[in-house]
Image (tube, helix red, strand yellow):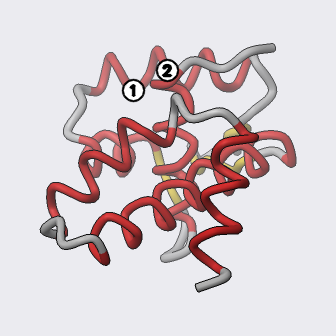
């Protein structure tokens, strides 16, 4: 199943928040600034797609597939943000631009960019 950009953003958010502790849908909504109905709909889609599971108390966990996607997007966001900052872009703009780029760059182009950045 192909995942939309918004789904990738939700998975990345769950991944980032889970590094700090247990994650509930309300935490995701607060972090992203989205309404409860929007988050609820997205979580339903991510659950049915096999990317997220929720326990009886509502705590969210990424499946192996969900974690793979989340780590990929997080790596892209982090690397592109750092690269733009090194080029002189302010941190906030770099992060916003990285967020847009991370969802659209091909695997081939990202891997080439990564090799170039990490070889310096």
- The crowding category of the residue bearing disc 1, from other C-alpha atoms within 10 Å (few below 14, some 14 to 19, many at least 20), is many
Residue nearest the viewer, comparing 43 with 104: 104
Q: Is residue 61 above or below residue 20?
A: above
Residue bearing mark 1: 39
- The crowding category of the residue bearing disc 2, from other C-alpha atoms within 10 Å (few below 14, some 14 to 19, many at least 20), is some
At 71% from the left and 43% from the top, the residue drawn is 69
Residue nearest the viewer, comparing 103 with 19: 103
Residue 76, image quadrant: bottom right
Image coordinates for residue 47, horizontal then vertical, percent: 70, 25
Looking at the rendering, in which quadrant would you find the C terminus? bottom right
Image coordinates for residue 8, horizontal then vertical, percent: 56, 34
The answer to the question of whether label 2 and label 1 lie on touching residues, with beta carbons closer than 8 A, is yes
Relative to residue 32, is residue 90 drawn left or right?
left
Q: Give residue 87's mark.
A: none
> Tag 2, which secondary structure?
helix
At 84% from the left and 40% from the top, the residue drawn is 65
Q: Is residue 15 above or below residue 85?
A: above
At 81% from the left and 14% from the top, the residue drawn is 1
Q: Residue furthest right?
A: 64
Residue nearest the viewer, comparing 45 with 25: 45
Residue bearing mark 2: 42
Image coordinates for residue 32, horizontal then vertical, percent: 28, 43
Residue nearest the viewer, comparing 110 with 41: 110
Determine the CA span between mark 2 and mark 1.
Answer: 5 Å
At 61% from the left and 15% from the top, the residue drawn is 45
Q: Is residue 5 above or below residue 14?
A: above
């Amino acid at each position: 199943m192909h995942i939309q950009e918004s789904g990738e953003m939700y998975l990345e958010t769950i991944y980032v928040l889970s590094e700090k502790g247990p994650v509930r849908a309300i935490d995701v909504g607060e972090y992203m600034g989205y309404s409860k109905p929007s988050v609820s709909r997205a979580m339903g889609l991510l659950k049915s797609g096999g990317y997220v599971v929720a326990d009886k108390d509502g705590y969210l966990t990424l499946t192996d597939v969900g974690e793979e996607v989340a780590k990929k997007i997080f790596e892209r966001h982090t690397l592109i943000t750092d690269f733009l900052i090194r080029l002189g872009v302010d941190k906030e703009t770099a992060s916003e631009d990285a967020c847009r780029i991370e969802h659209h760059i091909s695997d081939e182009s990202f891997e080439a960019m990564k090799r170039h950045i990490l070889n310096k």
